[in-house]
Image: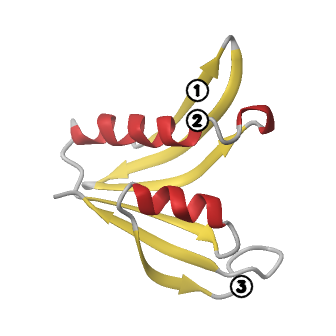
Amino acid sequence: PCARIDLCRRNGELAGFICWWLVAGEVQIQNVATAPAFRRQGVAACLLSHVFEQARGYGFESAWLEVRVGNTPAIALYERFGFTVVGRRAGYYADGEDALVMCLRNS
């Protein structure tokens, strides 16, 4: 009951998806993906906006995610939404890349 997967379709095609959890007032973003043909067209931002709109109805207090340190476009997107870096997980990904832990406080 706490896990969700939301899809974004554009012109009948799957443009992207977001997997997220809402547990005890905390949103955990598990995965955000945009199909290559739809990148740089606001799909991920649309999906994040949708999540926060849904979560506000349940009184969410914070949102958390991990992102590859080398994924600068995603980091910039999350920062535009108000996320800040609160930690780093060394070797988090299977290929050894570190992850940044990011948090958004809903005020």
Q: Please identify the quadrant where the C terminus is shown.
A: bottom left
> What kind of colouring is applied to the model shown?
secondary structure
Q: Which residue is mark 2?
A: 43
Q: Which residue is mark 3?
A: 91
In the image, what residue type sits under mark 3? Answer: Gly
Q: Secondary structure at mark 2?
A: helix
Nearest the camera: 36 or 98? 36
Mark 3 neighbour class, 10 Å CA radius: few under 14, some 14 to 19, many 20 or more: few
Q: Nearer the viewer, mark 3 or mark 2?
A: 2
Q: Secondary structure at mark 1?
A: strand
Name the residue at 50% across, 42% down: 45
Q: Is residue 12 above or below residue 59?
A: above
The image shows residue 17 at horizontal and vertical percentages of 61, 36
Name the residue at 56% across, 37% down: 42
Mark 1 neighbour class, 10 Å CA radius: few under 14, some 14 to 19, many 20 or more: some
In the image, what residue type sits under mark 2? Answer: Val
Tell me which label, 1 or 2, sits earlier in the chain.
1
Q: Is residue 12 left or right of residue 57?
A: right
Badge 1 vs badge 2, beta-carbon distance below 8 Å: yes
- Which label belongs to residue 8? 1
Nearest the camera: 84 or 21? 84
**Residue 4 in view in this figure:** no
